Every structure is written in C-alpha cells, then in structure tokens.
Amino acid sequence: MNRPGSGTASREGLTELYGRIDTLLRRRAKGFPRREEPTWSQLDAALGEAAARLRDLAATDPAAAPALDEELLARPVFVVGYPKTGTTLLLGLLDGHPQLVVVPGETRWFTDPEPTLAQLHGRWIRYLVNPSGQEPFWLLGSPGGDEDPYLAFTARLLALAAAHPERDLLTALVATFGENAAGARAWVEKTPLHVFQVDRIRGWFPAARFVQVVRDPRATVAAIRRFARHGWRTDVDETVDGVARALVQAEEAPRTYGRDVYLVVRYEDVVAAAERELRRVADFVGVDWSDSLLRPTLAGVPMRANSAWLDRRVVGEIHDRSLDDGSRDLDRRTLALVHARTSRGGRALGYEVPRVGRIRAAVIEATERVRRLAGAGRPNSSSTRD
C-alpha cells in the first residue's frame, strides 16, 4: 500500500481544519450533553469536511492491500444488550486485550441501512475524533504531521475496500482495525440493539458468539429517561418495552443457541466482582487472562464512562456509582409500568423486581394506553420518540 499522498487537497488546509475541530470539541464539551447551537452544527460540519479531505488525500494502491485473515474474520464476538445496560463498559474492558481485535464503537451493521464507503468512513472519523462528547478526544493520537493516524486509517480502509470489492464493508472495517493483529483469536463489536438481530447475525457469521449485558430494568430505564432532562427525546412505552424484550432474550437465548454461543453477564456483577466476571468472559471468548481486562480503554486510550449522570463519567476505571436500582429516579407511573412488564424477566435474572400479578399488570397497561391515547389527541404531546 502506498503511503498517504497529497491528493488534490492541501495537507496545510487539513491541519488548519484539525485546529478548528479541536476548538469546537472543547467548546461542545462545556455544554455536554446538550447539543448547543451553533457549536454542534459547526462541529458536525467540520468533521464531515475533515472526512472528505482525508479521503481526497489518501492515495492508496489496492493491489498492495494485505490479504484478509479469513480465520480471524470468521470468529466475531458481539457485545449486545439494551442501551444503558453496560455494553460500553464491557467493550472497554475487552479493548486492550492482545488477543482481540476490538472495533472501538458501534457499527450498527444489522440495525441501520448498509452505508456507502464514504458514509462508513465519515461515521468512523467522527467516532475516532469525538467518541463521547468529552475528553479524551482524538483516539488514534494527535492529528496531522508526517504520520497522521487519521490519514493512515483512511488509506487502509479505502485500500481494503477497493482490494476486496466482493466483500461487505464491515469486513474492510474490521480488517482496518486489525492491522497489527498478529495472534488475535477473535474480533469484537458492540452495538446494543444487535441483541434483537441474533438470528440475522448468525446467518452472516455462523460461528459468532454473543455476550449480552443485562442490568436492573429500573436502573436501565432511569438512565435512559435521564437524558430527557438534557433535551433528548425519549419514549417511556418504547423504552420499557425494549428493556422487557431484552430481559426475555437474556433468559431464553443461552438455551436456544447454546451456552457456548451465548453468554449473559450482569452489569452489577461486572462492577462488583470484575475479575471473576471478566475471567468468565475471557474463557467464553477463548482468550487468555490479561490484567488489561480490568482497565477500560477505547482504541487503547483510557475510556470515559458512558453514564447518564455526568459526575459518574470517570476515565479509565470501573466505578460503583451506578449500582442503585434506579427506583428513586422514576416517577410512580413509569415505575409501575417497569414492574408490570419486567417483573418476570428481571426476577429470572436475579433482580428483585416486585412481582406484579396478571390482573394488576393488565390494569397498569390499560391505564397507560388510555394516557397515551389522550396525549396523542392533544397538540404538542410530550410523548416523543428518539
């Protein structure tokens, strides 16, 4: 593969753009998690411009692209679970293991429409520059210079895609992150809502394994609802329904697919007994024990916790600040709905969710339907979807 070249854009212009992005990143972080304007739109546009310039600058030779490691590519591990259950933490704990290739972000490959190469590249430049909205930024290292890591990433991705046009772009992406993957035994991807795409994923990857992270359903709903305070749109009915479905999946999937294919871990156990739980995960994935499994990183950089509570977004460590069940953060109506829908699934996984009888559950559901119908008939209804 040729070294990144000059293309038709100037390296100087890209360096100036990097500086502007860095300023916008820090400005945006001050208002996080709110997407304050015009900073948010300016940052998004600048990142898109940077991605386009990188593609223009990346002179590659597809004929020199390395051969694909087919044995590695056939051994994926998908970290799944409903959003805000701890999937990001688990991905971070796996990230630094020398026998794993870890994709440091969500591909959403089986939930979103298949992207074009430009769309895929643009999305990943955003991930690698600004993974959490707060520091650390620039996961691949400082931008610019003779060995610009973002230009090198771009050149490798484009070359692999061009050299293997018969393959899907997910293959090119994994191979890009696996550039220095000698000795790797599996690759890891994390997209929470892949929890509902297991059969489809197995159609693509017959040898795929899955690690589902579960959490007390009240805490999961409370974390998602927390973002509503910052202007994010959430829908209670949709959220609770999704949490309930994911709990049922966790209960049934190990029997359906086999315990050598599907492993369930509880977020609370990962936090309270990290080494014990990560040894379980390591054995399941098929890698040796490494102390790196106790330090969350992203692309090798200490990772910021993905908590809905800003004071819990610590960097590079496992914290126990989110182990409460979340009940105190939910209003009575939402809590009743959570209990009605998640009691069976939650209790089967060891959570002390109050039992709700069928008649009581039916009453709660009927009340919720009436409330939603009444809200739908009013202008400016507060019931919105993400």
Image (cartoon, grey):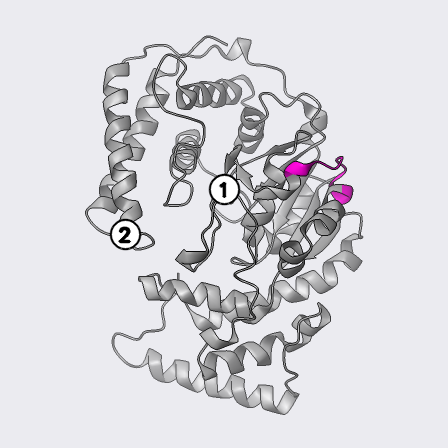
In front here: 115 or 126?
126
Q: In the rendered view of the protein, which quadrant contains the C terminus?
A: bottom left
* Residue, disc 1: 303
> Is 71 placed above or below 324 here?
above
Q: Secondary structure at mark 2?
A: helix
Q: CA distance from mark 2 to mark 1?
A: 20 Å
Q: Which residues are magenta?
A: 283-292
What x and y, as percent, mark residue 55?
36, 22
* Residue, disc 2: 31
> Is 107 placed above or below 318 here?
above
**Local crowd size for mark 2, using a 10 Å CA cut-off: few (<14), some (14–19), many (≥20):** some
At x 41% / y 38%, what residue is drawn?
136
**Res. 127 image quadrant:** top left
Query: What type is the residue that disc 2 sits on?
Result: Gly
Residue 9: tell me if it is visible.
no
Residue 215: tell me if it is visible.
yes
At x 44% / y 29%, what residue is drawn?
117
What x and y, as percent, mark residue 219?
53, 68
Q: Is residue 3 left or right of residue 47?
A: right
Q: Secondary structure at mark 1?
A: loop
> Any magenta on residue 289?
yes
The first of marks 2 and 1 along the sequence is 2
Q: Is residue 377 left or right of residue 330?
A: left
> Is 53 placed above or below 79 here?
above
In front here: 265 or 363?
265
What x and y, as percent, mark residue 103?
55, 36
